[in-house]
Each structure stands twice: as C-alpha cells, then as structure tokens.
C-alpha cells in the first residue's frame, strides 16, 4: 500500500503505468496531448491514435485531448483500415514471384560468369602481345 502511494506521489498523483485518461499505455506510447503550432504528426503517433479509436475511445474526447478536428481523425482511421485491406490481399508463396526470383538469380549468375570469362580473355590477349615482342 505504501509503495503504491509513493508511486502516485512520485508521478504527481498519477498511478505509474497509467496515462492521465486512466488507460494503460501501449508499449512505446508517445507523448499525449496536442502538438505545438507547426508540429508534425509522425506515422507512429498517428498509428497510436488510430489504435485508440479502434479500441472504442470516443472521437470527440480524442479530438479535444489531441487538439485535432474529428474529420482528420476519421480520415486517419479510414486510411489505416484501407492499408489493412491491402496488406491482407498480398499472397505469400506467389508462384509468379518465385519464378521471377529464380530467373533473376540465374541472370545474376550468368552475368558474373560472362564478366569472369571476359577478364580471362583479356588477360590471355595481353600475355600473347607480350610474347610476340
């Protein structure tokens, strides 16, 4: 009990591991609150806001807390959900990609072989020139 009281006192009345809103922070949570004028929102910070919306936090409360318009929060959520759809459409083990990778590997091997053979031919030509003198 005294440890818990000391944690609250050390945190300025807030319990350690809890944000001012009372929600448990996510690992690596970024600073809360609005940005300064001309501040930029990083993709990571936007992601944290979208995750809070998807967990069910009210848009109007988030809007007030972060100093953002509701339409912007809704736009971020729609973009995030669109990105999820795109990521889920990607197929693993695509046979065309596998074939393309195999062909690119073969092209690389043949290119190296041609380069080595050219150097070998150039070396033989230079030796033949030296001997003829």
Image: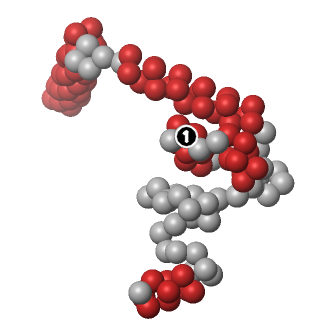
* Left-right relation of 104 to 21: left
The answer to whether one can see residue 114 in this image is no
**What x and y, as percent, mark residue 80?**
55, 30
**What x and y, as percent, mark residue 52?**
55, 45
The answer to whether 65 is drawn above or below residue 95 in the figure is: below
Q: Nearer the viewer, residue 109 or 52?
A: 52
Q: How is the image coloured?
A: secondary structure
Per the image, the residue denoted by label 1 is 56
Residue at 72%, 42% (x, y): give it: 60
Q: Residues within 10 Å of mark 1 (few under 14, many from 20)?
A: few
Residue at 75%, 31% (x, y): give it: 71
Q: Which secondary structure lies at badge 1?
A: loop
**What x and y, as percent, mark residue 51?**
52, 42
Quadrant including the C terminus: top left
The answer to whether 44 is drawn above or below residue 19 in the figure is: above
The answer to whether 57 is drawn above or below residue 101 in the figure is: below
The answer to whether 83 is drawn above or below residue 45 in the figure is: above
Q: Quadrant of residue 105?
A: top left
Q: Quadrant of residue 77?
A: top right
**What x and y, as percent, mark residue 122?**
24, 24
Q: Nearer the viewer, residue 11 or 83?
A: 11
Residue at 45%, 20% (x, y): give it: 85
Which residue sits furthest top?
96
The answer to whether one can see residue 84 in this image is yes
Q: Nearer the viewer, residue 36 or 14?
A: 14
Q: Nearer the viewer, residue 114 or 73?
A: 73
């Amino acid at each position: 009990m005294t440890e818990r009281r000391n944690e609250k006192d050390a945190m300025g009345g807030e319990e350690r591991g809890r944000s001012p809103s009372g929600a448990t922070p996510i690992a690596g949570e970024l600073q809360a609150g609005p940005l300064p004028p001309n501040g930029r929102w990083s993709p990571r910070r936007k992601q944290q806001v979208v995750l809070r919306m998807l967990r069910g936090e009210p848009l109007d409360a988030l809007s007030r807390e972060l100093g953002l318009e509701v339409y912007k929060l809704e736009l971020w959520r729609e973009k995030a959900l669109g990105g999820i759809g795109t990521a889920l459409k990607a197929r693993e083990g695509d046979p065309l990609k596998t074939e393309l990778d195999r062909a690119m590997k073969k092209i690389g091997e043949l290119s190296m072989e041609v380069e080595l053979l050219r150097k070998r031919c150039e070396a033989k030509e230079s030796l033949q020139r030296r001997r003829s003198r």
